[in-house]
Image (cartoon, rainbow, N blue to C red):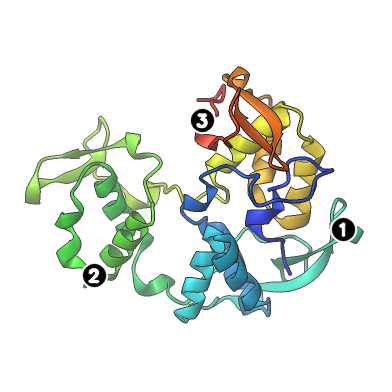
């Protein structure tokens, strides 16, 4: 397979302990899928990867990326630009036996990110129009304003994404002016019409922020940095890679004194001091906040 289950790959937070489903950020299963990873999985399945493997991850582990990839796969979505990629073993210094299966650019060993994948339903609507609907909703427009327009593919998909937890991550750059039919989405402070191509979604990044923060807390409290580096390289787990990057670049946790790392029911967890319940990554505050 191209990677280990994303919901399992970074779950073990001590190298000496087995991977365990209880050791990840408490709300990781509720985050929206990561679009680059969903496209990566679809490229893998289109190229011959085991669909049932991801179906298992989707149902048994409730991995958001696998759930969304299987939903699209079952709906007939396929990769259009298959000639650009191939599935192959590549050398991976930290992977088992120094090899890992990857979806790479054809003729190279460079792993794709997923953003390069073109899907068969990409032409159903423009991303800009979908993102403007999500921006409007993020800025307070009632869902009811769009529910009678679901015959328009962009609006139907925007509502589906919204209901799944999709939100605009840079909404602070925009504002809504006027009411009803006079409502306009503009760039904050300028009055220029909002450009949907500049709207960013929480599903655009290849990792859930809650995971990255949880992993950083584990590293700061004694978890192995090299373990996360190994999982990032071996399993194509972008959350681990981002956690390692931030730690190495000097990001610090400003409320680290509120947490502790301990074994609870056989699993090593990050908890609030004096408690046994695993924290959410949302509770971890960074120096960059």
| Disc on the earlier residue, 3 or 1 | 1
Residue 15: quarter of image: top right
Is any atom of residue 115 visible in this view?
Answer: no
Residue found at x 61% / y 78%: 46
Q: Which residue is mark 1?
A: 96
Q: Secondary structure at mark 1?
A: helix
Does residue 29 lie above or below 160 as drawn? above
Residue 163: quarter of image: bottom left
Residue 248: quarter of image: top right
Disc 3 packing (10 Å; few <14; some 14–19; many ≥20):
some
Q: Which residue is mark 3?
A: 283
**Alpha-carbon distance for marks 1 and 2?**
48 Å
| Disc on the earlier residue, 1 or 2 | 1
Q: Which residue is mark 2?
A: 152
> Relative to residue 61, is residue 68 drawn left or right?
left
**Alpha-carbon distance for marks 3 and 1?**
34 Å
| Disc on the earlier residue, 3 or 2 | 2
- Mark linked to residue 35: none
x, y percent for residue 105: 70, 67
The residue lying furthest to the front in this view is 265
Is any atom of residue 195 visible in this view?
Answer: yes
Q: Secondary structure at mark 3?
A: helix
């Amino acid at each position: 397979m191209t990677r280990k289950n994303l919901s399992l790959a970074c779950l073990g937070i001590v190298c000496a302990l087995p991977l365990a489903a209880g050791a990840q950020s408490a709300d990781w299963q509720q985050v929206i899928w990561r679009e680059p990873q969903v496209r990566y999985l679809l490229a893998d399945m289109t190229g011959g990867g085991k669909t049932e493997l991801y179906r298992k991850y989707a149902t048994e582990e409730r991995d958001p990326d696998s759930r969304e990839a299987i939903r699209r796969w079952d709906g007939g979505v396929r990769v259009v630009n298959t000639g650009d990629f191939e599935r192959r073993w590549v050398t991976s210094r930290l992977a088992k036996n120094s090899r890992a299966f990857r979806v790479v650019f054809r003729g190279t060993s460079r792993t794709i990110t997923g953003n390069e994948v073109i899907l068969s339903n990409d032409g159903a609507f423009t991303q800009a129009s979908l993102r403007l609907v999500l921006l409007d909703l993020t800025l307070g427009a009632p869902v009811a304003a769009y529910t009678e327009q679901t015959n328009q593919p962009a609006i139907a998909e925007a509502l589906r994404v919204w209901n799944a937890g999709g939100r605009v991550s840079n909404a602070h750059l925009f504002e809504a002016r006027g009411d009803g039919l006079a409502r306009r989405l503009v760039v904050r402070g300028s009055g220029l019409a909002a450009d949907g191509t500049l709207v960013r979604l929480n599903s655009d990044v290849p990792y859930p922020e809650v995971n990255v923060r949880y992993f950083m807390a584990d590293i700061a409290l004694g978890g192995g940095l090299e373990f996360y580096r190994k999982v990032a390289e071996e399993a194509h787990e972008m959350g681990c890679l981002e956690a390692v990057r931030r730690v190495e670049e000097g990001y610090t946790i400003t409320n680290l004194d509120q947490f502790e790392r301990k074994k609870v029911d056989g699993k090593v967890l990050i908890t609030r001091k004096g408690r046994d319940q695993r924290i959410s990554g949302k509770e971890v505050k960074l120096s960059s906040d």
